Image (cartoon, rainbow, N blue to C red):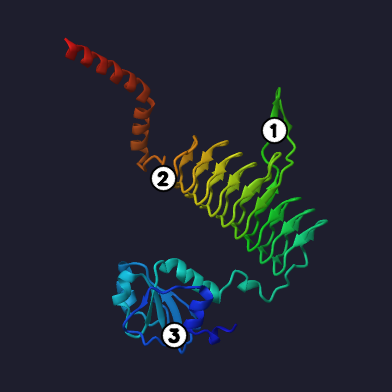
Amino acid sequence: MNSNDLTISKILQLAKIILINNNANTNNNFDSIKINGIASLSAAKNDQITFCLDKKFLQDLQNCQAAAIVLPPNLADFCPQNSIALIVKNPYADFAKIANVFYPPNYALKNSPQIAENVSIGKNVEIGENSYICSGCVLQDNVKIGKNCILYSNVVVYHGCQIGDNCIIHAGACIGADGFGFAPDGDSWVKIPQLGRAILGNNVEFGANSCVDRGTFDDTIIGDGCKIDNLIHIGHNCKIGKNCVMAACTGIAGSVEVGDHCVFGGASMISGHLKIAANTTISGGTLVMKSIKESDNRYTSVFPLETHEKWIQNASHIRRLDKMAKKINELEKLVEQLQNK
């Protein structure tokens, strides 16, 4: 559909937006006002839609020229008279849905061939309808790609691995390389065959130059709806639940089980063979070395930023904590003895 044909009413319908109410300054003329695109709050024109989340942008909001503005209820009264206020519970997510009406995931590839000329495709490969495989991709034998997927340039999917429907795999990603499995044998190492697969569920986005290893015997699984940022490694035999989010440079060692709806900040580090409860948030830069059994909590282990000299001083205190703890125990016993006398 041409963007010139989109009215506010049609956009709300396509994006499945439910309004809380309408601001009094609107004429409810959703069917007559046509919208040609989206823009930022300060740059939007009178044929575009924008959004505002916070009162700190109040001046930009009141000067906004947009035809319609997606707003939370607490900003409804600040909408300028020339704009229609679209009041919703979650303006950030709803504006993202509106943006996808104008720019669906494959909008940049619409005029491209669905399979580029220099793609390497092995035997028994299945590619679903309306999927785009860009230049330089390698799909080894027995790979399955779902429908409505995009594999950007130089993605490699190893033999037998699967990608679900509506997935976006960004450039340079590697799906299903061998897990890091080696058995010590004297002074050398014996490679352990990696016989499992890597399986990505539906609606997964997998970042540029990120890697997920195949399982040793069982499959490595990335659940439906997961969003994986760039430069992330997920080790063999991991089981990642649904709708998890991982920011860049997160590293997850092998055989980790992650519950649904977990959030990992950038450069999170998860040791192997752990279990992470559902709805857990891990702060950026945090090292997790034990299982997390209680859900709905946030965990942080980042040492506070200090000047180097101050950090060295604090580190020297940390190294003495064991001795200090023993001395405190001895003093507590001595105080108790004195109290008893």
Q: Is residue 228 above or below residue 218?
A: below
Q: In the picture provided, is 59 more to the left or to the right than 153?
A: left
Disc on the earlier residue, 3 or 1: 3
The quarter of the image holding the C terminus is top left
The quarter of the image holding the N terminus is bottom right
- C-alpha distance separating marks 3 and 2: 42 Å
Residue drawn at (57%, 42%), measured in percent from left and top? 257
On the image, numbered disc 2 is attached to which residue? 297
> What mark, if any, has residue 182 been given in the picture?
1
- C-alpha distance separating marks 1 and 2: 35 Å
Q: Is residue 242 above or below residue 300?
A: below
Tell me if label 1 and label 2 are in contact, CB under 8 Å.
Answer: no
Disc on the earlier residue, 3 or 2: 3
Q: Amino acid at mark 2?
A: Asn
Q: In the picture provided, is 145 more to the left or to the right than 259?
A: right
Secondary structure of the residue carrying tag 2 is loop
